[in-house]
Image (cartoon, helix red, strand yellow):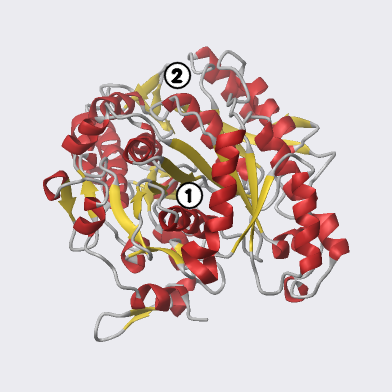
């Protein structure tokens, strides 16, 4: 079979104005970025507000493994299947980060015959949203250090600066740096840090803001440092808000592209779910709900991360009520969870499957705790056997889940019709009684421990002394009513990436906590998870190239 990029490059892409026309969007309601990409105008977004909402479908997955799951591929294929069935659907996805594109993943726009195009542009600079976020982030950092240099009227303690610079690239050497070296005019010497752009609070704010006014209010609340009296200093105090908002003005507008089968897709925002809140923008999701009868969206990594944050953060803040959840798994990944080496996954192994399916079982249980019907889909591989598939089907149906095989990777929308039918059946026959996992009024530690116990399966939580002090301080500052954003490894339900399947009898380790006051949540760092990833020994960048004609290769 051809590579993803070969399939994408050979595809016939329609002008984005033609895709817009299928939704009743005029050219005047678009802001064009070339022939195949556009942003929805503010006037069009305003026009949508009076329309009724369609049905909200969340796509999530089991914990990722080297065997692959195909969450985005399934999301895209499901949208294509709805299109083939004559159903009006809009897909709302996250935007890929450059870091993993050149690091491990090599691209993130679906795969096979279930992709979003133009694939190379989406995976690279796209419409510049991430550059705008990076610039706004670093403008705030520059204004902060300049304030200290120019007399420090706010009495900022350089030892208590919490705002970090960012870059949309995996670069481990930037995790801990020293700035201000040189002459007196070069600034105040202090320790500084970088996060990857997708972990920046600006990314979260962009994804959670309803409109420009809400964006500016959120920006103003960002806590950048503490003064010598231990009081918070905000971006509003630094008079940074107007300029930051100006940089983000166009980035606020959702991006319209298409699938290989010319279905409409909104791609907007892209925080990682292991170190951030893992959901595309509220604006894109709400727009998609108004634009079509069905909105298909996804949350990052496994359901223990992305789905939990979608429910407990995004839905809570935006008033969204999902109608159904699609949970993606593969037989290969389940056998991997059962202890089979990656090289041996091609062989039938019912024993390993039965051992590893506990990971899927836990995710089903977790999703059902939110009161939302679950459809399990197996992303099909040619190595799957009838016996393995039948056993998983029975397992899921015994747990009150609809079940479907997805073949969208090889067959595009046609391969997703069974899944689409099961999703529609679930929506029409099963009521969603969505509710978040915990109440706003619970303490921060109660929220952390609820997620750890109910979602991860931990026996309890161990806090470092520093983390306990930080959580108490945040509650004393009035942030105790905020939801928690858990930064945790994606590879395990626990905080130890080596513990596969369904870990039990473990204690979650919380080492740090800080407030993202503008985003509206408290970030809780567990285990060894980093907010600035590094590159692997063989980065995907080694295999990426472009020829004389501008044709890119190696971008998966």
- Mark 1, residues whose alpha carbon is within 10 Å: few (<14), some, or many (≥20)? few
Q: Please, which residue is most extreme toward the left here?
A: 28
The foreground one among 46 and 533 is 46
Comes first in the chain, label 2 or label 1:
1
Residue sitting at x 20%, y 39%: 249
- Mark 2, residues whose alpha carbon is within 10 Å: few (<14), some, or many (≥20)? few
44 lies above or below 78: above
Residue sitting at x 64%, y 65%: 380
Q: Quadrant of residue 389?
A: bottom right
Q: Is residue 218 visible?
A: yes
The foreground one among 370 and 303 is 370
Residue 366 x/y as whole percent: 69, 36
Q: Is residue 334 left or right of 313 when viewed as pictured?
A: right
Q: Is residue 514 visible?
A: no
Mark 2 sits on what residue? 230
Residue 494 x/y as whole percent: 72, 44
Mark 1 sits on what residue? 176
Q: Please, which residue is most extreme toward the bottom here?
A: 548
User: What kind of element bears circle 1?
Assistant: loop
Residue 110 x/y as whole percent: 47, 62
Q: Please, which residue is most extreme toward the right here?
A: 351
How many discs mark residues in the rendered view? 2
User: What kind of element bears circle 2?
Assistant: loop
Q: Quadrant of residue 120?
A: bottom left
98 lies above or below 24: below
Callout 2–callout 1 Cβ contact below 8 Å: no
Residue 425 x/y as whole percent: 58, 42
**Disc on res. 292:** none
Separation of marks 2 and 1 at Cα, in angstroms: 23 Å
Residue sitting at x 46%, y 78%: 542
């Amino acid at each position: 079979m051809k590579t993803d990029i070969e399939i994408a490059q050979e595809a016939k892409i329609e002008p984005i104005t033609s895709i817009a026309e299928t939704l009743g969007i005029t050219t005047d309601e678009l802001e064009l970025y070339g022939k195949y990409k556009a942003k929805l105008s503010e006037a069009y977004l305003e026009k949508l507000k009076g329309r009724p909402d369609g049905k909200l479908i969340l796509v999530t997955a089991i914990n990722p493994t080297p065997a692959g799951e195909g969450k985005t591929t399934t999301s895209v294929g499901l949208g294509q299947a709805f299109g083939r069935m004559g159903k009006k659907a809009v897909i709302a996805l996250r935007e890929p980060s450059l870091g993993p594109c050149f690091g491990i993943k090599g691209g993130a726009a679906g795969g096979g015959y279930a992709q979003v195009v133009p694939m190379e542009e989406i995976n690279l600079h796209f419409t510049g949203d991430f550059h705008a976020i990076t610039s706004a982030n670093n403008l705030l950092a520059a204004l902060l250090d300049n304030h200290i240099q120019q007399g420090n009227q706010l009495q900022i303690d350089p030892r208590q600066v919490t705002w970090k610079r960012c870059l949309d690239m995996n670069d481990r050497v930037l995790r801990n740096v020293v700035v201000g070296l040189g002459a007196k005019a070069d600034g105040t010497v202090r320790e500084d840090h970088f996060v990857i752009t997708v972990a920046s609070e600006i990314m979260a704010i962009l994804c959670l803001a309803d409109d420009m006014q809400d964006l500016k209010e959120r920006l103003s609340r960002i806590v950048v440092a503490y003064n010598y009296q231990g009081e918070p200093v905000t971006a509003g105090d630094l008079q940074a808000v107007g300029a930051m908002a100006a940089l983000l003005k166009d980035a606020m507008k959702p991006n319209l592209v298409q699938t290989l089968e010319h279905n409409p897709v909104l791609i907007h925002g892209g925080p990682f779910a292991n170190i951030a809140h893992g959901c595309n923008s509220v604006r894109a999701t709400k727009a998609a709900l108004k634009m079509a009868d069905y909105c298909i969206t996804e949350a990052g990594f496994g359901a223990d991360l992305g789905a939990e944050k979608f429910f407990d953060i995004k839905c809570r803040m935006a008033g969204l009520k999902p109608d159904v959840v699609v949970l993606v798994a593969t037989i290969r990944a389940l056998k991997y969870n059962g202890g089979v080496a990656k090289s041996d996954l091609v062989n039938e192994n019912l024993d390993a499957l039965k051992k590893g399916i506990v990971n899927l079982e836990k995710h089903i249980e977790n999703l059902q705790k939110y009161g939302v019907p679950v459809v399990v889909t197996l992303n099909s591989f040619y190595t799957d056997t009838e016996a393995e598939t039948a056993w998983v089907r029975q397992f899921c149906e015994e747990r009150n889940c609809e079940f479907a095989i997805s073949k969208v990777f090889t067959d595009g929308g046609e391969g997703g019709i069974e899944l689409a039918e099961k999703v529609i059946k679930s929506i029409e026959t099963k009521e969603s009684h969505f509710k978040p996992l915990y109440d706003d009024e619970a303490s921060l530690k109660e929220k952390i421990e609820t997620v750890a116990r109910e979602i991860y399966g931990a026996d309890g939580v161990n806090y470092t002394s520093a983390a306990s002090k930080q959580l108490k301080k945040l509650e004393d500052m009035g942030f105790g009513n905020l939801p928690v954003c858990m930064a945790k490894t994606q590879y395990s339900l626990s905080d130890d990436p080596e513990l596969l399947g369904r870990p039990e009898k473990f204690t979650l380790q919380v080492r740090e906590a800080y407030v993202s006051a503008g985003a509206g949540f408290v970030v809780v760092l567990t285990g060894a998870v980093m907010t600035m990833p590094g590159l692997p020994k063989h980065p995907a960048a080694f295999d990426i190239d472009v020829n004389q004609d501008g044709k890119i290769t190696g971008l998966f």
